[in-house]
Image (cartoon, rainbow, N blue to C red):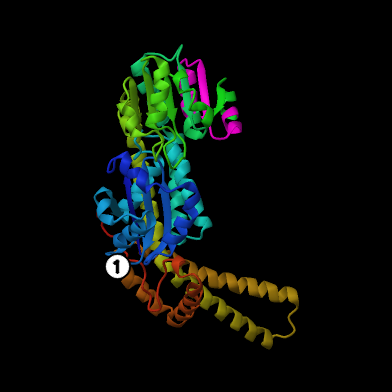
């Protein structure tokens, strides 16, 4: 069993590449289902944001795992792998876990410490869980990642400085105009990113805000929060000349504004400059718009470094979160190592319960005059004796699961307690259960007691 992540992000691929590997929200359930049925993938989660597309998987083949995931991407996006392989990174086991913790905590984001990614990872995990694409490992790992991120933001001040993609967009506008007072701002899209942008604009003095959305009701709802004016997308096409700043963030697959639309409206602006920021992936604004005189177009990749002054404090807080991540990684490793002893412990408990039941039956046959209360008292006391006898061996084998010689210790445990037959019965029951849902088989021991490697995960390879 190995945990891997294959993906691309703002560091490895420009926006024109990332937008080609963007999963539409409506298509994600089907994508997760197809990933789940990809060869050698036992569990899977897809995390897709404007800055990254990442596929997390539990795989049974260490050397071919990357090949199968790249094949999945090739088929889903309809692109030959030689067009995107150079942009991909792949981390295995320890480094994959470290990467997930860093992503969820906001340490791997373009704007370090942002919190939006936490909700995105959580939603990706819940969707995969809903599609039955997660099992023992990811159910534990992703819950741990989400809990860690919440704790990191609660126990540090990494989120106190106002920095986000939407904040960076506003900062860039201030560099051009100086201030927003007296300027008309048009926000295209009424989602979370647009709402954050409107919030920052309002705080920086923007008095007139036009909120554009395909659905007028949604535009009206957002505009009401900032005393803005709601308009439809169709209406906006003929009112572009009113705006000094246009910030677009929708989920549209095609360009919302084309070069021709903007060119026509610029004639009505009489050479007054128009500042446009596209923070959507895929992009909302046709890149050719940048060729129009007096139009200044920026996309999401242009925002990196805009808020450098606010990031220094976040970097200092990030050091504290790095320490938290190391603790969480140790905790996950310890938990993972105990998975191999679970079947042994269950086998011992099952065998002890059978012996207790058989002994109680024999005693009751020899003492038929016992009343119901006496029988319950004797059963409870004898069961307590059995449990106490087992508690110390169970505790010791859990502790030894993390030792270098864990395999030898567990083999000896099987021999000392004669657990070969109970293990065979458990494995056969598990085999029948797996036949119904083979992709979700948990990490477990085999008949002869083959636990996960005591040394932990393999070395990660980028």
Examine the rendered structure and indicate whether residue 85 appears above or below residue 157: below
Which residue sits furthest bottom?
366
Can the viewer see residue 158?
A: no
Q: Viewed as shown, does residue 192 lie left or right of 365? A: left
Pick the residue in front: 179 or 362. Answer: 179
Q: Determine the residue positioned at 39% across, 21% down.
A: 266
Can the viewer see residue 433?
A: yes
Examine the rendered structure and indicate whether residue 134 appears above or below residue 180: below
Q: Determine the residue positioned at 55% across, 26% down.
A: 231
Element assignment for label 1: loop
Residue 204 within the magenta-colored segment of the rendering = yes
Q: Viewed as shown, does residue 24 lie left or right of 461? A: right
Q: Residue 393: x percent and y percent?
A: 44, 69
Pick the residue in front: 364 or 49. Answer: 49
Span shown in magenta: 196-220
Residue tagged by mark 1? 405
Examine the rendered structure and indicate whether residue 412 appears above or below residue 215: below
Pick the residue in front: 204 or 349. Answer: 204
Q: Residue 297: x percent and y percent?
A: 34, 27
Q: Viewed as shown, does residue 147 lie left or right of 308? A: right
Q: Residue 25: x percent and y percent?
A: 48, 47
Q: Residue 124: x percent and y percent?
A: 47, 49
The quadrant where residue 325 appears: top left
């Amino acid at each position: 069993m190995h945990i891997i992540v294959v993906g691309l992000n703002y560091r490895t691929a420009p926006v024109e590449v990332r937008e080609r590997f963007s999963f539409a929200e409506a298509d994600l359930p089907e994508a997760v289902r197809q990933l789940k049925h990809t060869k050698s993938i036992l569990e899977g989660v897809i995390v897709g944001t404007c800055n990254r597309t990442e596929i997390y998987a539990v795989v049974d083949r260490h050397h071919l795992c990357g090949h199968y995931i790249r094949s999945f991407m090739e088929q889903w996006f309809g692109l030959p792998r030689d067009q995107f392989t150079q942009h991909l990174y792949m981390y295995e086991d320890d480094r994959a876990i470290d990467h997930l913790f860093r992503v969820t905590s906001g340490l791997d984001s373009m704007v370090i410490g942002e919190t939006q990614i936490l909700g995105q990872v959580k939603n990706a995990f819940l969707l995969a869980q809903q599609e039955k694409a997660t099992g023992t490992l990811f159910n534990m790992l992703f819950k741990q990642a989400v809990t860690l991120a919440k704790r990191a933001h609660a126990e540090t001040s990494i989120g106190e400085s106002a920095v986000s993609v939407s904040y960076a967009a506003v900062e860039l506008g201030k560099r051009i105009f100086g201030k927003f007072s007296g300027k008309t701002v048009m926000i295209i899209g009424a989602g979370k990113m647009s709402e954050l942008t409107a919030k920052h604009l309002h705080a920086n003095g923007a008095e007139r805000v036009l909120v554009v959305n395909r659905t007028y009701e949604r535009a009206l709802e957002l505009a009401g929060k900032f005393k803005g004016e709601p308009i439809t997308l169709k209406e906006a096409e003929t009112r572009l000349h009113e705006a000094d700043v246009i910030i677009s963030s929708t989920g549209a697959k095609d360009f919302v504004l084309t070069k021709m639309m903007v060119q026509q409206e610029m004639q009505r602006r009489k050479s007054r400059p128009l500042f446009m920021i596209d923070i959507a992936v895929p992009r909302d604004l046709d890149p050719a718009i940048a060729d129009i005189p007096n139009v200044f177009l920026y996309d999401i990749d242009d925002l990196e470094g805009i808020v450098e002054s606010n990031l220094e404090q976040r970097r200092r807080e990030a050091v504290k979160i790095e320490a938290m991540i190391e603790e969480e990684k140790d905790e996950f490793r310890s938990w993972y190592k105990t998975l191999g002893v679970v079947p042994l412990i269950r086998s011992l408990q099952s065998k002890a319960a059978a012996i207790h039941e058989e002994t109680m039956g024999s005693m009751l046959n020899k003492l038929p005059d016992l009343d119901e209360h006496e029988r319950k008292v004797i059963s409870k006391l004898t069961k307590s004796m059995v449990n106490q006898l087992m508690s110390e061996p169970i505790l010791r084998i859990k502790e030894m699961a993390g030792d270098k010689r864990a395999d030898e210790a567990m083999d000896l445990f099987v021999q000392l307690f004669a657990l070969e037959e109970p293990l065979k019965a458990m494995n056969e029951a598990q085999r029948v259960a797996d036949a119904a849902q083979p992709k979700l088989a948990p990490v477990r021991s085999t008949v002869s007691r083959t636990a996960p490697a005591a040394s932990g995960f393999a070395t990660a390879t980028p």
